[in-house]
Amino acid sequence: MKLFIAILLATAAAAAGQVATSNPLGLVTYRFPATASSATQYISIPLTSEPIYSGPLASSTSNATTNTLTFEGAPFTSLNLAQAGSPYFALILSGQQAGRSMLIKGNTANSLTVDITDNTIKSTPLNTASFSVAAADQVQVFPGDTLASFFGSTPAGLSIVAGGATSTAADTVSIYNRSTAKFDQYFFNTTGGVNRWQRVGGSTLISSNGVVLYPEAVVCIQRQAGRVESLGGVTGCVPTTQPLTKVLANVGFYTGTRLPVNLTLGQLNTISPWTPTPTIGTADVLSLFNAGTGRWVSYYLYGANWVQSSTGPSQNSVMIPAGAPVLLLKRSNAPIPYPHIPNLPYAL
């Protein structure tokens, strides 16, 4: 998956003889206006690469030393699914953890070792009570993206952003890191002999090309003055099961709806974790970025309506565009991943 790529093909899977499926494909577009001055825009990426494997789970193990998904046969023979710069994810498609994506940290011919932190500071084991994976649960394995695979790995191959000799001359890409609750900022360094992604303030000797873009990633793109208007397009697989996102109490975090369709705030009312309350100080809060003002606008559920104040009008018709990020603040703890969007609002 990459900006301006027309279609994705699981050629590596076919070559390796793995079982791949034809997931529905979608397209999400992003408009980047011409810039008279430096401009900031946030995006999320609700599509994934095509799976290289899909099949039922045989068993799982989750303890202090390992978190492993095991499959019948040897579907991952000759594959390295935890190679630096080439991330892969395991997506649970059925069962209690359906919709959960986990980074693969290692593999054998028939097993996957997965990261159960969901890119946060809290672990959620595979055998969590009332939220566990089980034999016969369906699992897909799909390639993830990195800074270089998504935005480009050469000066001529950059998509949307432009490189530069310094971070102040180049456009910057900041990726929200849920484990630190901060944005990590990068730029493509075009200095002779470097020509790679580099962390702002970091060493030119350390490449950031392989920085992982998680499925729930929010990316902040800052383009310098003088950039022309651009239209970016991302193709990939449409979610076929409701995506799950881990939420920690009283910790605001950036994510997306993780769906490639527009949603209104009113469509979120069917979700049980949203608690109606008369004051924003005790409410679960959802904020949307207004590119025109450069500010995040906050909403909360009061009765049956999303509002900005208890005496203000309903904001249920406010649109969350496909590929737009949201800033969430939940007051109650939900250490297991859960859906923060309604059931899939489309038929496949």
Image (cartoon, rainbow, N blue to C red):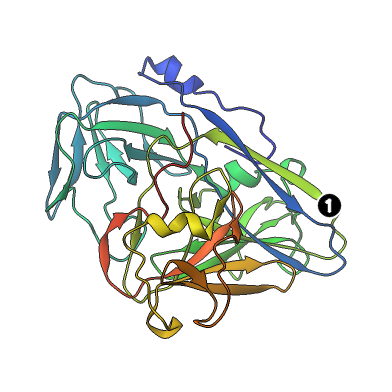
On-image quarter of the N terminus: top right
Give x and y (percent) for residue 63.
11, 52
Closer to the camera, 126 or 149? 126
Compared with 173, 71 (above or below) is: above
Give x and y (percent) for residue 151.
64, 46
Dot 1 amino acid type: Glu
Q: Secondary structure at mark 1?
A: loop
Is any atom of residue 313 visible in this view?
yes
Q: Report the number of numbered marks.
A: 1
In terms of image quadrants, where is residue 8?
top right
Is any atom of residue 204 visible in this view?
no
Compared with 158, 165 (above or below) is: below
Give x and y (percent) for residue 101.
35, 45
Compared with 282, 7 (above or below) is: above
Reading the image, the residue beneath label 1 is: 229
Give x and y (percent) for residue 267.
48, 54
Q: Is residue 323 left or right of residue 104?
A: right
Compared with 297, 338 (above or below) is: above
